[in-house]
Image (spheres, rainbow, N blue to C red):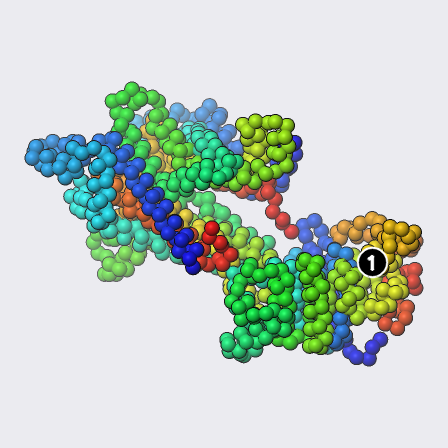
């Protein structure tokens, strides 16, 4: 346990989908924390609940999903009980978000300048010209040349990479302490991905920001995260610092994930080991999830009690915790 | 393959689960039923004016006359029943004409593209802008004058037929637009390519391959059009331009509007009939639209 | 800018072609039926040969049809629509008077409908799937499917005959204007017909707008706007609505055209002295100049309105490329 209080502390968060077909627990008891000036990688497959968890921080969970229980604390404030005004003050100013698809996260009928200055002027009492200047400064900061020209343009006139830079700039407008980045490079060209990641890393270091980086890509996380939390089917599997997770993963799912990630320094054609493995089976249907440990149907080490008991996080080493009955976690009746 | 095997059955299943679509279907089915067998069960003949003679014309609904009697002593219920086949004839007839023209124009435009497309679409736009209703009124009136003294005059229901044909002649642009969009979308699909590879003639491709796949969307517009045509005819007749020899709901409104105050049921009954028929087709079209193109409902 | 100008000119030219085409069709159609002379002779059996000759000369009845059409077009270009056969008044003047009565109903009908549709659609879209949403949408579907003139008849039946609140016909009282003022009297007469027109328009626009709003509200940029701390009202009305309303604006032109085209029915129901009623009597009387004049004006208005809404679309949505 670190001594510094975490910037963001999420405990036992549950977000459920309420549909006509039934209730689907998208997030079913996730814990993670982000320390100041640190990047936490929230890793999992699609459908693991990681995006919902990040949306929940800003209480942006879209209906028919709802935050059911748990606690989210930011700078020691309980975010789940904030009133509307405090929430509006929090969003964009103290905690900002970067979305997955830059093509769709900018309003197509307004200019970039209009959209950026609007946010700025909403949070701070600045004049139109001052706001415009600050927006231009930020565009320069994210590596856009000729920012004043860009401010006058519409989103559809810009490339994907440029749009994502603008979205990053939008997140930085009011110097937030925490950035929530939901798969910021997934929808970009591969060649641009590296640039954007480098930009993000440089900015977060320079501006001393904490970041919650949601991704399914182990490569991205390896590059950017200080600590990692692995989630599967709405539950936490393993948490630890990046080096430990990559070198000595404990949870069977984490191991499987790492083994199924192609690595450039491995020769898969000729060597017998290491081989590129896949994880057999499919992610569970959220509406009818497996009992006990969610991963047990696909786990090579699963035993009978794995289907009956739900593992609780267990600290195997300082700062490294695992939720697996086979690694020492106590189990509770599922 | 060419025919969409499961598409219609899937659509049918989805329609059955859509409440408003089902309601629309039942209303339409009801009207069709009335049109087909209603005249058999009507209490009187439509031209029975006995009420006039017994001074019970313009009478309120009684057991003898369930919807009352109208200005001329006719039984309102009977006339409303006899109005159903007329309405359906109008709707189906007009849409038949409109569909043939619309699918031909739109399909060819979408399939051929290029200048043919440009020309046909300008042609369509022209028809879209014409003040249709006003034109129909003028043409109906003028036509009825022209045929005076000609052998055409003696054709039964000539006026009604004219209205039906005119409604079709002016109602095809929406169908053409959709047909064009569909043909445009479908002509580049793999199955068309495959058909061409095995040597199918363009005529074959158009009618046996592309058209059946375009039908689901077209059916929606056609259903809406049927309701619209029935509504238009009722408005034309309401203004007095209808066929005096045909019994249509619009005609009933025209005859009895003067006595609205005294015998409101004579106006409300045919009005209600128009309403549920148009509503039925609108809801059916809505349901069909959802059935064939389900939007994601969470 | 240049693109927009070129687009405008192209549409303008095409529109003029449309108007010419429609007028030509009607003109030739009418002339196929008969001519003013026959009508005059039928109406006035005792008309003198001299008068007939004057009429013949005025209408150039000796010239072939196409020539007569061009002459008529020439007059129209100078805004001379001729004289009505049935009333002997200048057609232009009649159109203005009666047209004003029609527009008096239709313009407020569409503006009111737009405002109300925005309110209803916003409430329904924001509370999607709630009971409010269901209620609003059912009402809208009902209002859209109920034929306008039936609603008008019902309104008259209930509010004019049974409850006796509003007048059942006409635009003004012939004697004793309400509260001594013709303005108030006129407004009072407007209530029922205006309601009839507004209900249908509001229902249709609400259906359209809510569907669009729901789609827009689901988009990422709306979530991004909320995530930036903007208040919900601004997100819905500034960010979402502007996007959602673009296709609806085009529909305004169609609605207006529909109202204009069905004005004869509306004005029949309420015995309203507007251009629609004028048209009906013109057709009945075979008043050629009036028929031609009115068709021309209505077509120009329809085409013009379509052009305006298309232009608005192009101006508001920056994504539209004009090639």
Q: Residue at x 84, y 75 (%)?
A: A1
Vertical position of residue A92 compared to residue C319: above or below: below
Chain hosting mark 1: A
Res C268 visible: no
Quadrant of the image occupied by residue A317 = bottom right
Please state the total of marks drawn on the protein image: 1
Q: Residues within 10 Å of mark 1 (few under 14, many from 20)?
A: few
Residue C58 is situated, as x and y percent measured from the top left of the image, at: 14, 39
Res C254 visible: yes
Quadrant of the image occupied by residue C179 = bottom left
Q: Residue at x 70, y 62 (%)?
A: A193
Residue B269 is situated, as x and y percent measured from the top left of the image, at: 41, 37
Quadrant of the image occupied by residue B135 = top left
| B105 or B56: nearer the viewer | B105
- Image-based side of A193 in relation to B273, left or right: right
Q: Residue at x 45, y 32 (%)?
A: B101
- Image-based side of C157 in relation to C81, left or right: right
Q: Residue at x 92, y 64 (%)?
A: A328
Q: Quadrant for the N terminus of chain B, please.
A: top right
| A202 or B222: nearer the viewer | A202
Residue A48 is situated, as x and y percent measured from the top left of the image, at: 76, 57
Kindly identify which residue carries mark 1: A263
Residue C263 is situated, as x and y percent measured from the top left of the image, at: 33, 45
Q: Secondary structure at mark 1?
A: loop
| C16 or C279: nearer the viewer | C16
């Amino acid at each position: 346990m670190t001594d510094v209080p975490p910037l963001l502390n999420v405990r036992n968060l549950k977000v459920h989908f309420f549909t006509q077909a039934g209730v689907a627990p998208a997030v079913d008891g996730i814990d993670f924390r982000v320390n100041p000036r640190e990047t936490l990688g929230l890793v999992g497959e699609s459908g693991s609940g990681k995006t919902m968890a990040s949306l929940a921080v800003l209480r942006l969970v879209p209906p028919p999903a709802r935050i059911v229980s748990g606690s989210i604390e930011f700078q020691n404030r309980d975010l789940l009980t904030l009133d509307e005004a405090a929430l509006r003050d929090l969003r964009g100013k103290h905690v900002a978000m970067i979305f997955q698809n830059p093509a769709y996260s900018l309003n197509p009928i307004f200019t970039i300048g209009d959209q950026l200055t609007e946010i700025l002027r909403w949070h701070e009492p600045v004049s139109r010209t001052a706001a415009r200047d600050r927006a231009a400064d930020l565009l320069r900061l994210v590596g856009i040349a000729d920012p004043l020209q860009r401010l006058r343009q519409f989103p559809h006139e810009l490339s994907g990479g440029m749009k994502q830079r603008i979205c990053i700039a939008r997140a930085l407008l009011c110097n937030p302490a925490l950035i929530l980045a939901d798969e910021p490079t997934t929808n970009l060209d591969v060649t641009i991905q590296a640039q954007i990641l480098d930009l993000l890393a440089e900015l977060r270091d320079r501006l001393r920001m904490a970041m919650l980086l949601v991704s399914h890509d182990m490569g991205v996380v390896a590059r950017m995260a200080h600590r990692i939390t692995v989630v599967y089917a709405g539950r936490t599997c393993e948490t630890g610092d990046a080096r430990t997770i990559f070198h000595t993963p404990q949870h069977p799912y984490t191991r499987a994930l790492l083994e199924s990630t192609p690595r450039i320094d491995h020769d898969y054609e000729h060597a017998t080991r290491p081989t590129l493995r896949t994880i057999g089976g499919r992610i569970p249907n959220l509406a009818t999830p497996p009992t006990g440990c969610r991963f047990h149907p696909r786990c090579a080490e699963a035993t009978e009690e794995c289907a009956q008991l739900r593992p609780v996080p267990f600290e195997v080493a300082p700062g490294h915790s695992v939720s697996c009955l086979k690694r020492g976690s106590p189990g509770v009746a599922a | 393959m060419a025919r969409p095997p499961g598409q219609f059955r899937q659509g049918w299943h989805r329609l059955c689960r859509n409440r408003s679509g089902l309601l629309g279907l039942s209303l339409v089915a009801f009207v069709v039923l009335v049109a087909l067998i209603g005249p058999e069960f009507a209490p009187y003949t439509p031209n029975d004016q006995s009420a006039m003679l017994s001074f019970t014309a313009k009478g309120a609904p009684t057991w003898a006359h369930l919807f009352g009697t109208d200005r001329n002593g006719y039984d309102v219920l009977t006339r409303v029943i006899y109005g159903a086949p007329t309405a359906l004839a109008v709707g189906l007839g007009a849409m038949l004409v409109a569909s043939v023209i619309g699918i031909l124009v739109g399909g060819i435009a979408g399939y051929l593209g290029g200048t043919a497309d440009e020309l046909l679409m300008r042609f369509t736009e022209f028809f879209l802008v014409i003040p249709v209703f006003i034109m129909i009124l003028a043409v109906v009136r003028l036509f009825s004058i022209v045929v005076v003294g000609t052998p055409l005059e003696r054709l039964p229901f000539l006026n009604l037929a004219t209205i039906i044909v005119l409604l079709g002649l002016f109602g095809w642009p929406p169908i053409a637009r959709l047909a064009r969009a569909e043909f445009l979308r479908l002509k580049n699909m793999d199955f068309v390519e495959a058909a061409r590879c095995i040597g199918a003639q363009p005529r074959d491709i158009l009618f046996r391959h592309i058209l059946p796949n375009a039908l689901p969307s077209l059916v929606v517009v056609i259903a809406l059009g049927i309701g619209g045509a029935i509504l238009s005819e009722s408005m034309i007749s309401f203004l007095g331009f209808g066929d005096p020899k045909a019994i249509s709901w619009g005609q009933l409104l025209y005859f009895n509007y003067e006595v609205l105050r005294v015998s409101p049921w004579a106006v409300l009954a045919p009005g209600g009939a128009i309403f549920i028929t148009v509503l039925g087709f609108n809801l059916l079209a809505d349901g069909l639209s959802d059935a064939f193109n389900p939007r994601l409902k969470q | 800018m240049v693109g927009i100008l070129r687009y405008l000119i192209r549409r303008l030219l095409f529109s003029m072609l449309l108007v010419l085409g429609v007028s030509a069709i009607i003109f030739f159609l009418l002339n196929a039926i008969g001519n003013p002379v026959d009508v005059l002779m039928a109406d006035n059996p005792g008309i003198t040969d001299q008068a007939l000759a004057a009429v013949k000369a005025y209408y150039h009845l000796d010239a072939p049809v196409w020539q007569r059409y061009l002459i008529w077009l020439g007059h129209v270009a100078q805004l001379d629509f001729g004289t009505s056969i049935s009333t002997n008044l200048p057609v232009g003047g009649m159109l203005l008077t009666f047209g004003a009565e029609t527009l008096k109903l239709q313009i407020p009908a569409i503006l009111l409908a737009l405002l109300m549709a925005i309110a209803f659609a916003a409430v329904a879209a924001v509370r999607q799937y709630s009971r409010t949403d269901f209620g609003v949408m059912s009402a809208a579907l009902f209002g859209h499917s109920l034929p306008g003139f039936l609603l008008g008849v019902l309104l008259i039946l209930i509010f004019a005959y049974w409850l006796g609140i509003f007048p059942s016909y006409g635009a003004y009282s012939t004697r004793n204007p309400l509260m001594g003022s013709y303005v108030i009297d006129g407004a009072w007469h407007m209530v029922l017909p205006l309601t009839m027109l507004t209900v249908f328009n509001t229902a249709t626009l609400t259906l359209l707008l809510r569907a669009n709003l729901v789609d827009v509200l689901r988009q990422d940029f709306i979530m991004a706007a909320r995530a930036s701390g903007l208040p919900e009202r601004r997100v819905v009305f500034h960010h979402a609505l502007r996007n959602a309303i673009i296709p609806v604006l085009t529909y305004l032109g169609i609605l207006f055209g529909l109202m204009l085209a069905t004005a004869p029915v509306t004005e029949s129901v309420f015995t309203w002295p507007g251009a629609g009623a004028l048209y009906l009597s013109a057709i009945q009387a075979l008043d050629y100049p009036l028929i031609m004049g009115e068709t021309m004006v209505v077509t120009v208005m329809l085409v013009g309105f379509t052009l305006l809404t298309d232009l608005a679309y192009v101006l508001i949505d920056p994504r539209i490329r004009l090639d």
